[in-house]
Amino acid sequence: MAAHRKIIHLDMDCFYAAVEVRDNPALAGKPVAVGASPTGRGVLTTANYEARKFGVRSAMPTATALRQCPDLILVPVQMDKYRAASQAIHKIFADYTDKIEPLSLDEAFLDVSDCEQCGGSATLIAEEIRQRIYDDQQLTASAGISVNKFIAKVASDWNKPNGQTVITPDQVDQFVAELPVGKIFGVGKVTEAKIHKLGVKTCGDLRPFSERELAQQFGSFGERLYRLCRGIDNRPVKSDRVRKSQSVERTFSQDRADAAALLEKLPDLMDDLERRYQKQKQRYAINGIFVKIKFHDFQTTTMAHSGRYFWDKALLSHEFAQLIEQAWLRGQRAVRLLGIGFQFVELDTAAKQGDLFTDA
């Protein structure tokens, strides 16, 4: 029998807010959130646990958060500071394994199956990493340790903040069986409600359904549900994650009345998208473009066009403009957010398919 993998999911606790409290000890013990100004339509990126007691959470409109917690201390986003802390933390990870898959600045998967430190114990490795992060950055992290990415990620949320949970191979079956289906990655509110209509609340309840039955109910995602409800996840920890898309978006301080008003913002969005595309260390071929519109009533629509594109700003601007006009016609009402973006294919893949891409 093959040896089980040893996977750690490290998740920093309230990362942005924790960095701000670290750098300003006067904030300790007070409700703190990082985000945009309450004027206009700013939202929060992070809230610490003191703020969460009032129902404040990430992605909440700043104005709403201040109504729920009048004493909330709002700190502006300072990405350079958070990136520096993240880079220092990832250097610690690299002392234990080169199999590191970052999910964001504040979380990552580590495969420590071949690590010899701490006697090869993933539990002790996680403890040591968390202690080193605190000693080096004065920040706390939580960890989940298990045999695959799915279970490790769920487990990292079990003992927050500043704790860790280990799910050993012999505990996997029962642990997963008791999990609410909403804990499965990819199960949102709509899918969860659909699963509940089948009389299913936990992963164990889902197991009597065959793979075919789940595929009939949920399409290709049904096959994934069949595996994950049994604790099966064979995805490797990928050090080089493939970027599938890249986008930029703007939430307007005042609603834009029509497509013409949206097109006035397209040049600025194109400039931002160009900067992000050119900054990538690994270049990808553009395999499609899309626009996203959120109307004033929060209904969202996306319009896409598949096809191979060179980096030609004038041509791309023309294509985006057409998609914006078509997308607006779906709702024909005021718009609060506009986004544009690319779908990618790796250059190596494109070359195998006989295509040639350049940054014209």
Image: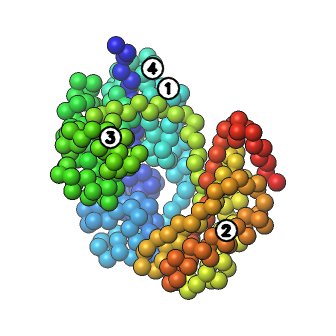
> Is label 2 in a helix, a strand or a loop?
helix
Judge from the rendering whether residue 245 lies leftward or rightward of residue 286; answer left or right: left
The numbered disc on residue 320 is 2
In which image quadrant can residue 149 be found?
top left
| Amino acid type at mark 3 | Arg
In which image quadrant can residue 329 be found?
bottom right
Q: Which residue is mark 3?
A: 212
Circle nearer the N terminus (2, 1): 1
In depth, the one of 175 and 108 nearer the eye is 175
Q: Can you tell which of label 2 and label 3 is closer to the viewer?
A: 3
Report how far apart the C-alphas of labels 2 and 1 lie in the structure: 43 Å
- Give coordinates of residue 240: x percent, y percent: 58, 36
Q: Which residue is mark 1?
A: 97
Farthest-out residue, top: 1
Q: Residue at x 39, y 48 (%)?
A: 219
Judge from the rendering whether residue 33 lies leftward or rightward of residue 316; answer left or right: left
Q: Which residue is mark 4?
A: 115
